[in-house]
Every structure is written in C-alpha cells, then in structure tokens.
Amino acid sequence: MMPSEKMSNRKILYILLALLVAVAVWLYADMFGNNNGPQQAETTITDVPITYTGEDELADRGLMLMEEGTTASVDITLSGARMLIVQPDRDDIKLIADLSSVEKAGIQNIRYEVRFADNRFSTSMIDKPNSFYATVNVTELNSKTVDVICELVGNVAEGYSAGELQLSQKTLELRGQEEDIQDVSYVKVTLDIGEDAMETVSQDLTFQYYDAEDQLLEGTGIHPTESTIQVTMPIYVTKELQLVVDFVESAGARVSNLEYDIFPDTITVSGDAGVLRDIDSITLGQISLLDLLGSGATSHTFSIIIPEGCSNLSGVTRATLKADFKDITRAQVTTGKFTYSSLPSGKTVDILTQELTVSIFGTSADVAAVTGEDITVVADLNNYASASGTYTVPAKIQVGGGGDIGVSGTYHVQITIQEETASDEPDPPPPEE
C-alpha cells in the first residue's frame, strides 16, 4: 500500500471517530444536560381533526350538528423531553367530542377528550390542558316522512312462486335541515334474490335517496331514523306429500304381516320452499301393532297436521287408516319349564307351580311349530330380596324355537323363598335369558 493511501484511510477513520464522539456528546447533553435531566422542547401538531360522537342521541332530541360554525380541527402543542417530542405526528392523536349531553340548539362549547396512540404521551404534556374545548353549532332538525320503495333483482326457479314482498317498514322518517331534506321524494332499497331462487330471501338493506324526478341524491346532511330496511321475499313451492303412519312392531306383530291403506294417501300443500325442501311425507301418528291386534279394530282416524306456515291446498283435514293382519293365529300352549331370575343373596327358591298355559300369537306356520318345550316361564324375584315365605310373583315368558312369536296376557307363578342353610345344596343357576 502506498503511503498516500495509508494517510487517506487514517483520515477517514479519524473523521468517523469524531462523528461518534460528537453524537455521544450530543446524546449525553440531550439526556442529562438540563440539571442531570433531559433537554426540554416544544412541538406543535397543526390541524388535528376532532371526531364528534353522539349525533344519533342529538337527533333523538330533534337537534343536529352544523359544519358551519363548528370547530373542525385544533392545533396541539406538546412539551417534554426533546428526543420524545420530535416523534409524534397527527395520526398519533385522536380528539373525541361527545354530543350526547347537548340538549339545546345554539353555538356552545363542549369539552373534547385527547387520546394518544402511543402510551409514552399523556395529556400532561399538552400546553394549556384546561383549554380542551371546541365550539359547536347545534341547530334544530326538520323532519319529513317518505315512502320506502324496493327494486327486485333476480328470478324465481321454475316450479316455485314468489309471495308478496315484505318490508320492515313502508315509510321512513328523515331529519335534517330543510334545504337538505326538501328534495327527497322517496328512498329505495334493492333486493337481489339471485338466479333461480328456491328459498325465501331476507336481507337488511341500506337505501338511497331519490327526488320526484327519480334522480339519485347524495343524502348529505340527512339523518334517517333507521340505517337499514329489512326486506323479505317469500319463495313458495307446491308439493304432494305422502301420508304415513308410524307402526311400532312387536314379536308376532310385524308390518310385513299387515295389509293397510290410508285414505287419502297424499295431500297437496303449499308453503315456504325452505320449510318444504326436505319434507316428502306427513306422519299422521304412531300406532302399536300389538294394540291393533288386541283391539281388533280395523279402522283408525287421524288429524292431518301440516308443516307450520304451510297451506293445505287439498282441504282434507282427516285421514283414515284401514289395516288388518294377513295371517294371524292364536294358540294356548301348556309348559312345565320354569326357572327364576334375580335370586336373593343367601336364599333358596322352590317353584311350586308345575304347569302354566300361555297364550301365543303369530303367523299360522310359526304358531304351529311351537310346543311346550319351546316355552320357559321365568319367575321375577327382583322385588323379593329380603323376603321369606310363599309368594305369587310375576313371570316372564320366553319362547324359543326360532319363530316370530308374541305372547299376550300377564302371568304369575307361586314360589317359596327360604333362608339358605349349610345342608342345602345350591340351586342350579337359571338358564341365560
């Protein structure tokens, strides 16, 4: 390296060191040069806008804020540590003035609140903190009621029909200065039901202002009593619904062995497409096939309950079920097979009943196949845990053999319960049910 190049590099190094020393001295003086405290400074942020709130409450009192004569912005002067004061700008400061407490018209002063986006700043840094007041020009509102008109966009799908358009309100009260509201003839909302609508459409819609010549107005200075209008377009569909009965099956009484008809078997209804979309039938009611067999009745009448909000276009309000079993046989079968369930602890049981005749039913083939060996009578000892002696207890009937057999009637058997002794041989366990 040439001597001249070395000298040049040293010179640059000295300059950088000098700059660093100067910055350090300046920072020290700025932070501790004011009696060991930071240097103080002032800065003024000009034209900080004031945001006015509570205009709805003002309108409820028949008043409104006028731009003319109302303070729109103020200058804010901050004092404090010089390094901090140079940082804020207009966006760091929010001025909020609440109009909700204003109760009369006229030019008046109201206090505004100062908020800082950066918590390093506070109102104590503001010059003249007691001067947080803005001048407002409040005047009385005029009011006018206009019609609400809805424009419909879109179409209803084939097979569906549109009902009458429903608006949450047909008129709207407008408030404002006479010159602002006098040209408004009506407000208009637009409901877009889309292409091939198949269900009811309901929306909260904003509106626009129009004059008597159907020209759109800006709406500046107008204060409506509502900000949106709810509009509903009902979409209806007409459907033929099947009438059905909920049959409850039992052993020996199955729907597969039932012949039945419902008169009428369908009705035609009209209603909201959203309600009827997934509905293809109406359940008239529930009926137990065991009750149907026991009553011997072949005819039952039901009221037709249509979905809520729908219309019964058929006009028929009742339906009749006619039902009978295709193949049903009853028989009396005697059995000598007995056992018990829920044996009390520390007890022995002796079943005194030797034979029991049981009434069974089912198809002729299934009933004919049942013998006494297929029927077991099970004495229920569930409520006799602390008993001793002879009792008549309820019994359940079990039918084996593989057929679909029902049992009618109630049954009891006589048993003796005794305390178990050492000489007693344990009773064999009852067979599994």
Image (cartoon, rainbow, N blue to C red):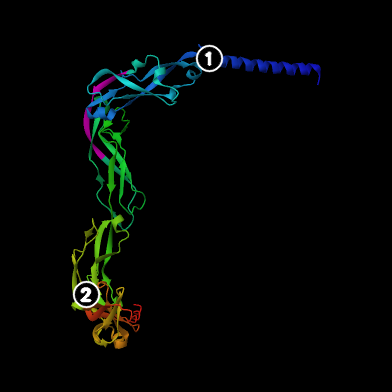
- Name which of mark 2 and mark 1 comes first in the sequence: 1
Q: In the image, is residue 431 above or below residue 175?
A: below
- As for residue 327 lying within the magenta part, the answer is no
The residue that disc 2 covers is 291
In this figure, which residue is indicated by the disc labeled 1?
Answer: 32
| Up-down relation of residue 285 to residue 310 (above or below) | below
Image point 30% across, 61% down: which residue? 279
349 or 209: nearer the viewer: 349
Give the SS element for disc 2: helix
Q: Label 2 to label 1, Cα distance in Å?
A: 101 Å
**Residue 59, image x and y in percent?**
25, 28
In the picture, measured across the screen, residue 375 lies left or right of residue 322, that is right
Label 1: how many Cα within 10 Å (few below 14, some 14–19, many 20+): few
Tell me which secondary structure the magenta stretch mostly adopts. strand
Residue 378 lies in quadrant: bottom left
The quadrant of the picture occupied by the C terminus is bottom left
Farthest residue, direction right: 2
Q: Position of residue 394 (x, y in %)?
A: 23, 77
Residue 41 placement (x, y as % from top left):
48, 13
Type of amino acid at the residue the image marks with label 2: Asp
Image quadrant in which you'd find residue 131? top left
Q: In this view, does 15 lie to the left or right of 1?
A: left
Q: Nearer the viewer, mark 2 or mark 1?
A: 1
Where is residue 269? Give x, y as percent. Answer: 24, 61
Residue 346: tell me if it is visible.
yes
Residue type pointed to by label 1: Phe
Judging from the image, what secondary structure is the residue with disc 1 in? helix
Q: What stretch is highlighted in magenta?
A: 134-148
